[in-house]
Image (tube, rainbow, N blue to C red):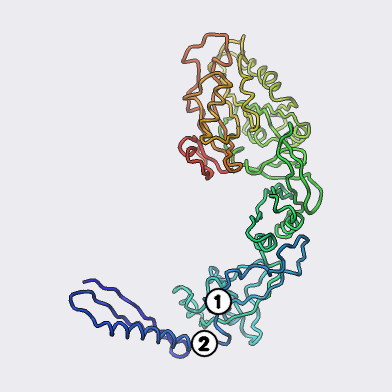
Amino acid sequence: MRCEWFVILWRSFGYSGFLKTYHYRIITSNSQIPFTWISRVQSLHKTLAFYFSSQRNRFSTMPEIDMNKIDPELYSPPSQVRGMTKLDRTAFKKTVTIPVLKVRKEMVNKLVRSLKKVLLQRPGIKRVIDDPKDEGNKLVMLDPHKIVSDDSFEESERLLLKELNVNPQISSYSLELAYENFKTEEILRAVLPEGQDVTSGFSRIGHIAHLNLRDHQLPFKQLIGQVIIDKNQGITSVVNKVNTIDSIYRNFQMEVLSGEENMITKVRENNYTYEFDFSKVYWNPRLSTEHNRITELLKPGDVLFDVFAGVGPFAIPVAKKDCMVFANDLNPESHKWLFHNCKLNKVDQKVKIFNLDGKDFLQGPVREELMKLARQPSKERKPSVHIVMNLPAMAIELLSTFHSLLDGQSKSRELLPIVHCYSFSKADDPTKDVQQRAEALLGASLKGCSSVHLVRNVAPNKEMICITFQVPASVLYENQPINQEEQYLKPEILEGPPFKRQRTGKASLEGQSQNGSQT
């Protein structure tokens, strides 16, 4: 026998306050209940529902909010702001109807703490106001998308209302919203052409908000900039990138959309402080996790060569680990701020700074330091040597520089540098693409001695990849015979601590990336 139970809840709203539960069942078996009985029960259900709805309305001081009339665009600014290009804050006034509870003053604090999930959440709106009809009461504003009647409360919330002797009857209240009460995305969605993408996200660099606006957003750029300043405390300048990073100094032209022109800013990343002129150097706050990932790979006493050091996000944390760092950048502004930040973070005694082209840095200071390390007595511990090449647009092309870099020196299996080289890839299989390009430039296989790490998705079908490998001895000492066992260090030296991987649509990277990262 199969049963289905139906429960009719009979609540007395105006009088006794008790709850009655009636059960009926439809039995499916050889014996059939007459269809007319079922029809009468269903009719009774509807009659009771109608009756108690009438009772609720009878005892309501204000009309009950109708669930079917809840406006999905309740928090959308007025339609007349559509197409606005010069911000007029006064045009955003709008009146909406929301549910409220009447509560005695002495009960308000306890009630508000317990009903957080269903309270109104609007910027700049007080959730508790005076009751204009009763000085002893307060009105507690509720979220109209969660509460439409007293039946909307969960059982635990109903018990609380009963404990505090609060009538669960919902009343409606006319609330006036203004510009200050709308969120950034709500304002921009109402202003920009209907159906167009809305950009409310940005990169924050100290007091600067950095946008990458699309063509259809450009007519509204000043308004967008001002809204972001208004809605984000501490943002005093909004800029838009107006070209790609195609200069040899890795900076880009930018336009100040709103706020002050001051581009000298200060940021904190991984507990270190960096100051720089954002208009003249490269800085990407999305690389914070990647900077930390590489830093964790080095141990005290190791050596780092940072070929494209920027203002120091790799060099400074590594130097703090009591490592020796050689940091280089061709951009004179980056060189200046790198020097400044090393002093600011008290690592200037551990970082040697250069202002050279990347290839010249590898063939000059890097080669010289490796030779010095090779001449150290064999009993002394040889430090692990890491070379970071973070210039994804072209760093991989410099891998050919490692050919015969240490020719003429006694080969040392302990001094084969570990390279972390960054590159962009638009291939269907970015892992395979980057490894094949690296092998072609080195003229040697990296099978078994490399790992490929997804840094981040830069754009649709464009990934930023870091390939980490140990430079083969046959590349560094090209004119000397190399035994197979002298060719590489153990593969595990390339692996670092696990990091959370950034979500990506590239399924092939899921299995092939050694370590994941969200940057």
| Mark 1 or mark 2, earlier in chain | 2
Q: Is residue 342 above or below residue 373?
A: below
Crowding near pointer 1: few (<14 within 10 Å), some, many (20+)?
few
Q: Is residue 47 above or below residue 122?
A: below
Q: Secondary structure at mark 2?
A: helix
Q: Which residue is mark 1?
A: 69
In which quarter of the view is residue 267 placed? top right
Q: Which residue is mark 2?
A: 57
Residue 70 in sight in this render: yes
In which quarter of the view is residue 95 placed? bottom right
Between circles 1 and 2, the one closer to the viewer is 1
- Amino acid at dot 2: Asn
Q: Is residue 357 above or below residue 242?
A: above
Along the line of sight, the residue nearer the viewer: 491 or 475: 475
Residue 337 is situated, as x and y percent measured from the top left of the image, at 76, 36
Q: Please indicate whether residue 424 sits to the left or right of residue 342 in the image.
A: left
- Amino acid at dot 1: Lys
Q: Secondary structure at mark 1?
A: helix
Q: Residue at x 31, y 80 (%)?
A: 23
